[in-house]
Image (cartoon, helix red, strand yellow):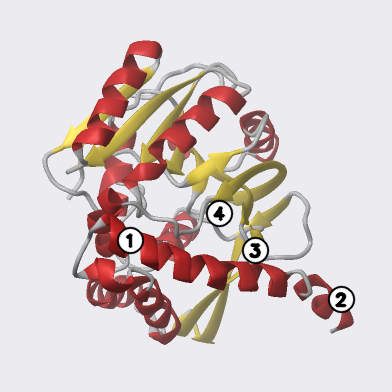
Amino acid sequence: MAKRRAPLSDERPSECVAIVVVVRDRVSTFPRCLEAIYANTDAPFRVIVVAGAVDRTTQQYFHQFQKQKNNLSVMLVDHRPMQCEARNIGIRETDERLCVVLENDTIVHKNWLAPMLQCLREEKAAAVGPLMWWYRGLHAAGCMFEERGENGVGTFHHRIEYTDIRRKRIDYPESHCILIDRQQFPSGIDIFDDVEPFDVDFGLTLRKYGLSAFLEPRSAATYAAPPPLEVRDIPSFRSRWDPVYWEARNKEFMRKWAVTYDPSEKLASYRRQQLKLGLARWCPTTFAVGMSNVAFAWTNRLLSLQSRAWPKRRRAE
């Protein structure tokens, strides 16, 4: 069903950008995310936070931070919205032509926005993504489709790019941070859909309407991969990494686009994320969360060390 869409401003792209910040899997990362936006953004902007069912500590933080910033709006809905629902809520509340959708565990780097705006103007793109980093190094340099079958119907895959770091056309940006030109999308539609994988769905939506996406490597952000977690993160973390929900929404994705998508790799990833909770999954106490953080801190450290050899292996291949 078509939903209300705010009228778009006629302002030039360089004049004002709406930054919609949504919860991914940890409410405790809001301070790092918001403070990085205000410290590192190099273009006029305003911020719209979309969150629901957050704890008292997070609510108090929002209240205090809003007192300091006159360009910050916080929307606390009465339930815990799914990722794309939160994105669409925030986008519908903006009247700017350009909008960044940013997950709250993503930390933007210094001077991150201006290069994306320049790329969008020069390439006439509908969506632009930055270079994404995480604790193991480079996380994503854009994403591409891989299809097998006739007329686009068959087994559908996608891959995250790690090489060829330059401005280039991609099938869709990594979901942590996306700059969108709303004016290029048809009026009356929600840009995102709560099917899974929703980022691939966004890429197919771009293809459907003949819109382009680009990687802008002069812009960068870091995905703060968990753990550590806090007790208040447990509800949102469990909701985000629910394999049963993902599998159900994956079936909707396949029906929507008439493709086959092998869910095994994604489901395995979701189950691993649930394991990171350890005892905290059933007993969300400070002690249980702390034990899980200690256990996986060592795992992350080993993965980080292992990843240093990865570029050398790639060059050898």
**Residue at numbered disc 3:** 136
- Total residue callouts: 4
Q: Position of residue 70 (x, y in %)?
A: 38, 11
CA–CA distance in space, label 1 to label 4:
32 Å
Residue 134 relative to residue 264: left or right: right
The residue that mark 2 highlights is: 315
**Neighbours of disc 3 within 10 Å: few (<14), some (14-19), many (20+):** some
Labels 1, 2: front one: 1
Evaluate if marks 1 and 4 touch, with contact meaning CB atoms under 8 Å apart. no
The disc labelled 3 sits on which kind of residue?
A: Arg
The answer to the question of whether label 2 and label 3 lie on touching residues, with beta carbons closer than 8 A, is no
- Please tell me whether mark 4 or mark 2 is closer to you in this view: 2
Q: Residues within 10 Å of mark 1 (few under 14, many from 20)?
A: many
Determine the residue positioned at 35% across, 28% down. 48
Q: Earlier in the sequence, mark 2 or mark 3?
A: 3
**Which residue position is annotated with label 4?**
173
> Tag 3, which secondary structure?
loop
Residue at disc 4, secondary structure: loop
Check contact, mark 1 vs mark 3: CB within 8 A. Answer: no
Which quadrant of the figure contains the C terminus? Answer: bottom right
Of badges 1 and 4, the one in the foreground is 1
State which quadrant residue 113 falls in.
Answer: top right
- CA separation, marks 3 and 4? 19 Å
Q: Disc 1 or disc 3, which is closer to the eye?
A: 1
Mark 3 or mark 4, earlier in chain? 3
Q: Which quarter of the figure has residue 127?
A: top right
Kind of residue sitting beneath label 1? Val
State the residue lying farthest toward the left.
78
Distance between the alpha carbons at the discs numbered 1 and 3? 22 Å
